[in-house]
Amino acid sequence: MPSSPKYLNSRQSLSLARRSTALIISCLIIGIAGFVFGTSAILAASRGGYSCKNSEPRSVRVVWERDRGFKSGSDGVVLSEKRHKVMGFVGIQTGFGSVGRRRSLRKTWMPSDPQGLQRLEESTGLAFRFVIGRTNDKAKMAELQNEIAEYDDFLLLDIEEQYSKLPYKTLAFFKAAYALFDSEFYVKADDDIYLRPDRLSLLLAKERSHSQTYLGCMKKGPVFTDPKLKWYEPLSYMLGNEYFLHAYGPIYALSADVVASLVALRNNSFRMFSNEDVTIGAWMLAMNVKHEDNRALCEPECTPSSIAVWDIPKCSGLCNPEKKLLEHHQKESCSKSPTLASDD
């Protein structure tokens, strides 16, 4: 028996209602899924802290090949397409066994967050990064990657991190720093000194008549020893009646013209000595630079004029840096004394 028009219309209406309900439910499910996904993404970004900000990562791995906006020249020097402009770049030399030192530094004069580093750079004109090489130890590299993810304050060099290879690391540091930063001065500093960035900024900002400047706490002849280290090699190089002059290793600075000359060198152009401060000093002698001696860079105690404080002559740095850095920072004479205007 054929269906009546009334029955057919009723059945079609019911089918249409079911399809409409299914469509509404599907849209609702998609909407809920989108909301959950979006919320999860926001929460994940917030857990990442500064990783969701607009600025580029501050830590960078420098390799001698085309990578991440770099161009490699025929001499193996990395040239950044956009060099960051600062008055001074300070590379804090560190190693895989110096986690405690870095922890203490971040509790004292060096900010522990990228925003703090940015504020320090804006107030002083100085950029700061920890400088470290690589190792084949996967566990150590994994720990370093975790530290980079947390603090984002590293410059990683494509060179093996080894105490016996410090001269090579130092040269690699200056080349990488020059490639990344357009700076008036490049400063090599160790991770076991107490530093006053505000006073270092004033020192570097002084007017100088010589464009090729080698700035540090200078020494002549045989230098001190640390019980934990070997004797520095005797300095038998003579110029007339003067000993070979060079800066103590914990901190020294080279002007942009000097670093540009180093960058132009091939790695085997100059002789490497067993100590990086002797090596750099010998090269400076060959380049006929202006030696600028400043004793405020090697003070044993905090004073109204001290820039870098370390246990000279007992240790090449602070003898117990993890503890002494914190102790110095608690002293008003170290962390809170006013910064005096530099003498021109």
Image: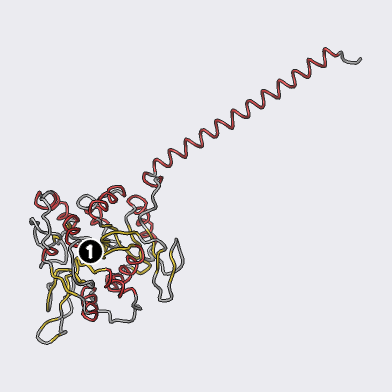
> Does residue 75 lie above or below 8 as drawn?
below
- Residue 145 placement: quadrant: bottom left
State the count of labels.
1
Residue designated by label 1: 189
Return the residue nearer the eye: 267 or 82.
82
The spot of residue 337 in percent (x, y) is 10, 50
> Does residue 21 lie above or below 157 as drawn?
above
Q: Which residue sits at x=9%, y=85%?
A: 241
Task: Report the quarter where the N terminus lies.
Answer: top right
- Residue 175 placement: quadrant: bottom left
Return the residue nearer the eye: 138 or 17.
17
Would you call the spot at circle 1 few (<14 residues within 10 Å), some (14-19), or many (20 or more)? many
Q: Which residue sits at x=34%, y=59%?
A: 84
Q: Amino acid at mark 1?
A: Ala
Return the residue nearer the eye: 321 or 151.
151
- Extreme residue toward the right, this view: 1
The spot of residue 268 in percent (x, y) is 34, 81
The secondary structure type at the circle numbered 1 is: strand
The spot of residue 38 in percent (x, y) is 49, 36
Task: Report the quarter where the C terminus lies.
Answer: bottom left
Q: How is the image coloured?
A: secondary structure
The spot of residue 284 in percent (x, y) is 22, 77
- Extreme residue toward the bottom, this view: 240
Q: Which residue sits at x=71%, y=25%?
A: 19
